[in-house]
Image: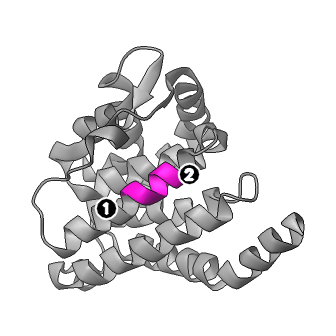
Amino acid sequence: MDKNRALTETLDVIKDDTSGQKINIGQLVEALEQRGFGPILMGLGLITVLPTGAIPFVPNICSFLLIMMAIQILVKKPHPWIPKKIKNFSFSREKFLKGIEIAKPYTKVVDQYAHPRLSFLMHKSLAPFMAILVIFLALAISLYAYIPFMAAIPALGVVLLGMAITAKDGYVLIISLILSAGSIGAIPYIINAVFDSTS
C-alpha cells in the first residue's frame, strides 16, 4: 500500500476487491488483511464514519471487530482472524460506495499531508498502547451508537489511528490521540444522555 495515499487507497481497495449488492465483513477483512492491521482499522472505522454507520447494528459489529483486532495485536497474531458468523454480516455496498465518492475529495487532501514523521512515536514497542486505545475507542463507538450518527466521532479516531500506523505518521497519531481523548472522556455524558432519553 502506498503510504502517501493510505486513506484513499484503503477506500479503493474495498471498492475494487468487493462485489455484489452487499459487502460482508469477511470480504472486507480479506481485501485488507495482506496490508496489515492499520488498513483494517481504517476500513472498520470508515464503515461507521460513512453513511453505512447509520445502518442498525453496523457500529456495534464494527466495535466488536475492533476489540478482536486489538486483542490480536496484543498477542502479536500475524494475521487477523474473525468468527465465521461475524464474517457473514453484510451491509449495502451501494450505500458504502456512495459514501466513498463523497469522502474521496477529503481523503485525498488528508493523504497529501500524511507521511513518515516523528518515527519514535510509531515504534513497535508502542503497539500494545495503540491496541488498548482501540479497545477504548471501540467501547466508545458501541455507546455512542445509541445516539444517531454520534458513533462516527470515536470511529474517526480509529480511522486516524489506522492511518498513522499505515503511514507511520506521528503527527496523525497525535491528532488521533486528541480526538480519542475527547471521545473517551465524554463517555460519562453519553451514558447520561442515553439513560435520560430512555427514562
**Quarter residue 150 falls in:** bottom right
Residue drawn 17% across and 85% down?
125
Where residue 144 sits in the image (x, y, percent)?
A: 66, 64
Crowding around mark 2 (Cα neighbors within 10 Å: few <14, some 14 to 19, many 20+) is many
Circle 1 SS class:
helix
Residue drawn 53% across and 54% down?
60
Q: Is residue 196 above or below residue 99?
A: below
**Badge 2 amino acid:** Pro
* Residue 183 in view, yes or no: yes
Where residue 25 sits in the image (x, y, percent)?
A: 37, 38
Where residue 73 sits in the image (x, y, percent)?
A: 21, 69
**Quarter residue 17 falls in:** top left
Crowding around mark 1 (Cα neighbors within 10 Å: few <14, some 14 to 19, many 20+) is many
Residue at numbered disc 2:
59
Where residue 18 sits in the image (x, y, percent)?
A: 34, 23
Q: Is residue 52 above or below residue 144?
A: above
**Badge 1 amino acid:** Met
The numbered mark at residue 120 is: none
**Quarter residue 165 falls in:** bottom left
Specify whether residue 134 is painted magenta: no
In the orientation shown, which residue stands out farthest toward the top?
20
In the orientation shown, which residue stands out farthest toward the left?
78
Residue 138 located left or right of residue 117: right
User: Which part of the image, by quadrant, shows the N terminus?
Assistant: top left
* Residue 1 in view, yes or no: no
Mark 2 or mark 1, which has the lower sequence index? 2
Residue bounds of the magenta highlight: 60-65
Measured Cα–Cα span from mark 2 to mark 1: 14 Å
Residue at numbered disc 1:
68
Q: Main secondary structure of the magenta part?
A: helix
Residue 131 located left or right of residue 7: left
